[in-house]
Amino acid sequence: MALVSGASALLVGILVIGYAPFSPFSPFEGLWSTEVDVYEEVGKLRTPYGGSYAIHAYDWAEWSGQVQQAGGQLREVNTWEEFTASLEGLDVTFLMLDDEDEVVWCSPAFADQTTYLEYVQLFTRPSLPVLLFVVLSFFPSLVVLTFFFAQILSGRSRRRTNYRSAFIISLCGLAVSTAIALAAPLIPGSIPVLDVSIVLAAIAWVLLLRYYCGTGWLESLPPAFIAVIIYVAIVAVASGFSTLLLAE
């Protein structure tokens, strides 16, 4: 178990160092910080007629204001895959693009809906928001869950509270969850990263509780489920604080 906890801590350390914008030796520099030319990405798309989309430069703020004044709707998508999927079946041969605001959108003629994508989110790594969120969620979760698992272990063994084992259980589950959250830029946008990270953390806690408590699967599930609820609550609070701090 010491090896598992050490490996988990090492993994989180590597990902944090690689994710930090000030890191001079990021092992993931080519994957996480390389900016993609949106013009090149648009050039890969094909219109319903088999040709390439033309790109018209326009001011997004002005365009969106005109659409709203005319009673039209603005539909935002969060991934490049969603945006390209929205083009299917549309009789459109050009896309609108605002280089300054980094927004690309499609506005078919005689349609009351404009689909747009803030593509800056796709091609740059949001290091400050993610790292701030990780700090505000990881360390409080580690402290609270360590005390929680310590009480579970002491209740099972009927001996003094074992904080060392509780710390290992908390750290391993949180390390798995945090590593996946930090690796989000490497994961396809169609995968719910946060949900997957929480499920894998729960599985890790169940396995570790079985090991340390000597219980079966069913007996290990309730404490792990409660730990997940505690973790989700802390993550929600951390998300709110991160948003408030970044908004200032």
Image (cartoon, helix red, strand yellow):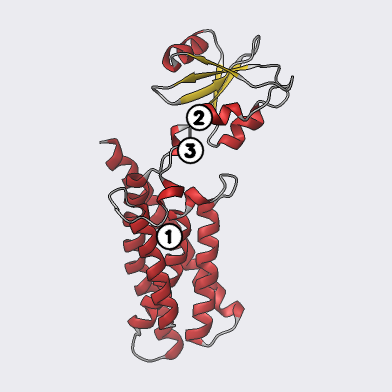
Q: Residues within 10 Å of mark 3 (few under 14, many from 20)?
A: some
Quick one: SS at disc 3? helix
- Judged by depth in the image, the label closer to the viewer, 1 or 3, is 3
Residue 157 against residue 79 in the figure, above or below: below
Task: Give the label on residue 94, or none.
Answer: none
Amino acid type at image mark 1:
Thr
Task: Give the label on residue 38, or none.
Answer: 2
Quick one: SS at disc 2? helix
The one of 6 and 24 positioned closer to us in this rendering: 24
Q: Residues within 10 Å of mark 1 (few under 14, many from 20)?
A: many
The one of 30 and 75 positioned closer to us in this rendering: 30
Amino acid type at image mark 2:
Val
Residue 55 against residue 66 in the figure, above or below: below
Reading the image, the residue beneath label 1 is 178
Can residue 28 be seen by looking at this rendering? yes
Amino acid type at image mark 3:
Leu
Reading the image, the residue beneath label 3 is 122
Quick one: SS at disc 1? helix
Quadrant of the rendering where the N terminus is positioned: bottom left
State yes or no: discs 3 and 2 in contact (Cβ < 8 Å).
Answer: no
